[in-house]
Amino acid sequence: MTLFRGPRYLDISKLLPFASHHGIAADASVAVTVRDSESSKMEGGLNLGATEWGGVNFQRGASGEGEYTHNQTFGTHPVSALNRLLDKLAEDAEYGLLQDVPARPLKRQDLECERDWVVSDATEMGSTLSSMFGLLMKNPSLMQSSDGPPAEAMGEFLQEGNSAGTSLVLESAERDDLDRQVILLMDRGHMLPGVEIADLEDELTVFGQIDNVVSENSSYSLKRFLLPRVNRQFRRKLDVEGLEGHFASQLDMEWDSSALDTEGPAVVIRPMAMY
C-alpha cells in the first residue's frame, strides 16, 4: 500500500534533479513574457493549484506593447513526482533512505524525519538583521553615531518593516533521545500557495539532506544562512550585540542574539519537502 503525501513545502529546484537521478521524469519548463526593448523584463508565476498541471499565470504590464508569452508544460506534476520518488526510494533496499536521524549522521545523507516543528527565534532575528543591514549598507555612517540612528533613518527602517529576506529556520520542539536538536534551513518561497508559516508548526515529516552535524560542546552559526547577501568578511566582523544599542532599543522587540547560534549536539537539514 502506498500513501499520498500532500506537501506544504516543496523545493522544486532540488526535487527535479534528484528525481531525474533516480529515474523519475519531472521536467520543469520555462514560461517567459517578453516585452519591447524600452520596457524589457520577464515576469511570471507557477500556479501549483491549477486543475491541469502546466498552467502558468502571468500578469501583463501597464504598456502591454510588443508583448508575447511562451508557455511549456511540466511533464509530471512535482507533487506526483515527489510521491513516486519516495515510493521508489522506500522500495530500494540498496539505496537505504534513512527513516530518521541516525545515531551517527553524515553530511549529505538523505532522510525522512518526523518531528513536531516550531519556528526558531532566529527567523525573526534574521529578518530584522536583513532589514538593518540593508539600511546600514545605504548609509554606513549610521553606525558611527553614539546616539544611534537619527529619527528619519529609523522611520525608513520601520516603514520597510522587518520582512527582508526569505530565510526560514524551524527546529524540533524537543531534543531527541540523544539530546540532539534538529534544525531546518528553509526558504519561504517554497511554501505551497495558501500555506502560512504557522501551518509548518505541526507534527510533519521532512524529506531532505543533512547539511551539517554539530557535535557536543560545539555551536553552529546561522548568520551565513540568514544573511546570504552579506559577505564573509563583513559577517565575521558583525557585532550583533552592538546593534542592540543602535536599533533594538528603539524597536518594540526582544533582542536575543544567542538565537543566531545553535548549541550542539544538533543536526542541520535542508528540506526538499515537508508533508
Image (cartoon, rainbow, N blue to C red):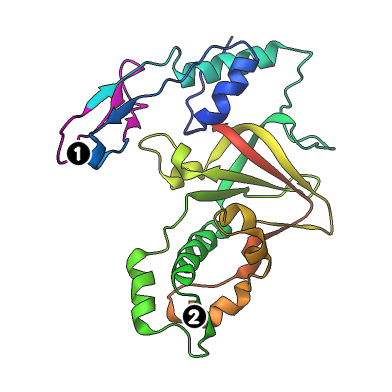
Q: Is residue 57 magenta?
A: yes
- SS label for mark 2: helix
* Mark 1 Cα-neighbour bin, 10 Å: few <14, some 14–19, many ≥20: few
Quadrant placement of the N terminus: top right
* Residue in the picture at 53% in, 49% down: 168
Residue 74 visible within the image: yes
Amino acid type at mark 1: Gly
Q: Give x and y (percent) for residue 21.
A: 64, 16
Q: Nearer the viewer, residue 152 or 117?
A: 152
Find disc 2 in the rendering and name its residue.
141
**Residue visible at 51% across and 22% down in the picture:** 5
Q: Please tell me which residue lies in front, 9 or 24.
A: 24
| Magenta run includes residue 120 | no
Of pointers 2 and 1, the one earlier in the residue sequence: 1
Question: Which disc number belongs to residue 255?
Answer: none
Task: Give the labeled residue for mark 1.
Answer: 61
* Residue 75 vertical position relative to residue 238 in the rendered view, above or below: above
Front one among 161 and 152: 152
Residue 126 higher or lower than 75, as above or below: below
**Magenta residues, start to end:** 43-67
Residue 203 in percent (x, y) is at 56, 39
In terms of secondary structure, what is the magenta stretch mainly? Answer: loop
Q: Secondary structure at mark 1?
A: loop
